[in-house]
Image (cartoon, rainbow, N blue to C red):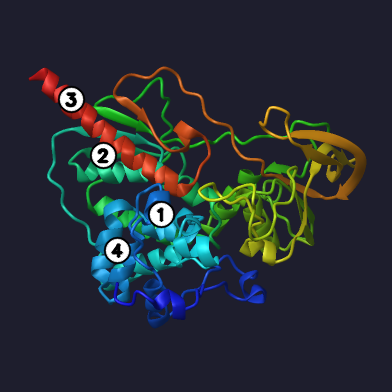
Amino acid sequence: MGNPKAFMTVPRQEAGYRPIHDRILDFGEVEQTLNTSDRKLQASRCMDCGVPFCHWACPLGNRPPEFQDAMYHGRWKEAYEILSLTNDFPEFTGRICPALCEKSCVLKLTIDAPVTVREDEAAVIEAAFREGYVKPQEWQRNGRKAAVIGSGPAGLAAANQLNRRGYDVTVFEKDEYIGGLLRFGIPNFKLNKAIIDRRLAVMEAEGIVFKTKSEIDPNNLPEGFDAYCICTGAPQARDLNIPGRELKGIYLAMEMLSQQNRVLAGQTFTKENRISAKGKKVLVIGGGDTGSDCIGTSIRQGAASVTQIEIMPKPPVGENSATPWPQWPIVLKTSSSHEEGCVRKWCLNTLRFIGNSQGNVTGAETEEVIWEPAPDGGRPMMKSTGKKKIIKADMVLIAMGFLKPEHPVLPDNVFIAGDAATGASLVVRCIASGRQAAADINAYIKNQQSCAE
């Protein structure tokens, strides 16, 4: 490294977010960027550890010490080339990844100030696009065809890797736009959709064919392909089937989030079909990232108030002795959306929804619960306390996660990747899964060729 002692003199500096009073007025990306000089200083904090836990922790096997050393020395093209060896879409992960690498950084484990790997990654790919390093390339064709069903992060990664291996790739997407979860599930204030379109333009120029509004039945796959990769995600949300669920004003989180993204893309909806939090008391049920996205979206739509409830206990702040490294640290996460104005409550179970004579939701009855260790050491047991309270709300968003998809028995030349295979996961894991599926397809085709000779 150019400055092996920089971590001792250069403190961690995050780019931070746009001011709250400014960002809640639009759906522009909330995260800011550092200037080039400060960004290079942050890259210099990487100690190039003998055993880089960041590399081990990344599902993609990214090499932070290598690309950060290159960017510290101003070799941005080299940094981009190193990063692109393992990551098809650094512009996505650099914005929305929870940075498993940083949770394993030695500086995180010793002084709780990890290297800003995620932000550095985003800086590298933005510099690459800005300087023209990202160019469509021609790949030698192998005469084989592959179909990718679904265009989320797993599908795009599988398509990209298969195309580079010489396959003629067609991506089928049931919706009207390409992008899957990236397009419809993630708000624009976290991922501007122009970032997706920029990458799609490169992939199309390299020969990948995208077909929208093409819903494919896994039991009736299109003919003419040597292999198939199913990357249809985990579309079935976990619902809350309790009394009052039929009341108007109660929605699954993705109903709201996907519609808002469509509105920002220029689509229009009737007043009856428009899901808007304007002037409403919003209740978000579920304490994860999707719930956080609902909060930020509701605030931008003009909600009168937003309350988020979670059935699990409030995690500790900063450190959690129950989840030491190398486990994922279960600690309190305060997102940019939380900072914008939200009441958060924990250990609340929702018993029923309450409505008025017009059939509109007006609130939810909740009960405090406690969690006790299981005798066998398994999942903690939830116990009721009898302490009930009503939370007023005229709009409820259910953000309780997604169900793992089930698939029929499929032929040997059909592979499954991403959330479709594992259930809801991280974008970075989906990209890794898509890459692996492409490698598996290639190995399968080569084996078929060997057997035929």
Sequence-wise, the earlier of marks 4 and 3 is 4
Q: Secondary structure at mark 2?
A: strand
- The kind of residue on which mark 1 rests is Phe
Q: Could you tell me how far apart the alpha carbons at marks 4 and 2 are, in whole angstroms?
A: 32 Å
Which-is-in-front pick, marks 4 and 3? 4
Q: Which residue is mark 2?
A: 169
Q: Is residue 209 visible?
A: no
- The kind of residue on which mark 4 rests is Glu
Q: Secondary structure at mark 1?
A: helix
Name the quarter where the C terminus is drawn: top left
In the image, 325: left or right of 63? right
Question: Disc 1 vs disc 4: Cβ atoms closer than 8 Å?
Answer: no
Sequence-wise, the earlier of marks 3 and 2 is 2
- Between 351 and 362, the one lying in front of the other is 351
Q: Residue at x 22, y 47 (%)?
A: 207
- Above or below, 415 against 11 in this view is above
- The kind of residue on which mark 2 rests is Val
Q: Could you tell me how far apart the alpha carbons at marks 2 and 1 are, in whole angstroms?
A: 35 Å
Q: Which residue is mark 3?
A: 447
- Above or below, 383 against 100 in this view is above
**Residue 216, percent from left and from top:** 41, 29
Q: Residue at x 37, y 68 (%)?
A: 47
